[in-house]
Image (cartoon, rainbow, N blue to C red):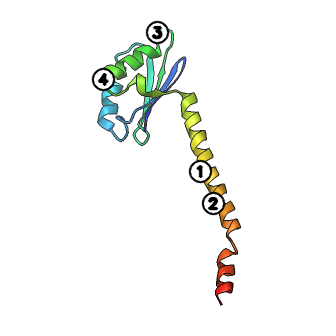
Amino acid sequence: MSYYMHNVPGRLRVKSPLLKRNDAAADELKFALSTIQGIAAVDFNPITGSLLINYNNRTTNYEDIIGLLERKGYFDRKKAMSNDGYLHNAAEKTGRVIGRAALGMALEKAFEGSALSLIGLLI
């Protein structure tokens, strides 16, 4: 799992491998984020390691929030993938899977009768 960040004004989602199945880290971050004025809600998904942070973009900005996550050691902006990068990787992976399946089907069809033909020649 890689780092992921997506921000629209007032809503920030971050994913971190350091948060996955780490309730203690989530509790620490929820408390730390509560000290930033303008944070409205923080939701944590321990299965994905995702934090969803709703904030008032008039009183704070996502840079302050990301800065806090980095200072606490739970996020690395340099390793973070954007939403576009995340979607690109997912589409690329899907394309590879479909390509392999199509190739497998084509090869299976091409060699479908070959084994029977070989057995017939040997008998």
Please, is residue 115 above or below residue 16 in the view?
below
Give the labeled residue for mark 2: 104
Give the labeled residue for mark 4: 72
Please, is residue 100 above or below residue 37 in the view?
below
Which element type, helix, strand or loop, lies under badge 1?
Answer: helix
Q: Amino acid at mark 1?
A: Val
Of badges 2 and 1, nearer the viewer stands 2
Give the Cα distance between marks 3 and 1.
45 Å
Give the Cα distance between marks 4 and 1.
38 Å
Circle 2 residues within 10 Å: few <14, some 14–19, many ≥20: few
Dot 4 or dot 1, earlier in sequence: 4
| Percent position of residue 91, x then y | 61, 40
Which element type, helix, strand or loop, lies under badge 3?
Answer: loop
Residue 59 is marked as 3
Q: Is residue 86 visible?
A: yes
Give the labeled residue for mark 1: 97
Dot 2 or dot 4, earlier in sequence: 4
Dot 4 or dot 3, earlier in sequence: 3
Dot 2 or dot 1, earlier in sequence: 1
Q: Amino acid at mark 4?
A: Lys
Q: Nearer the viewer, residue 100 or 9?
A: 100
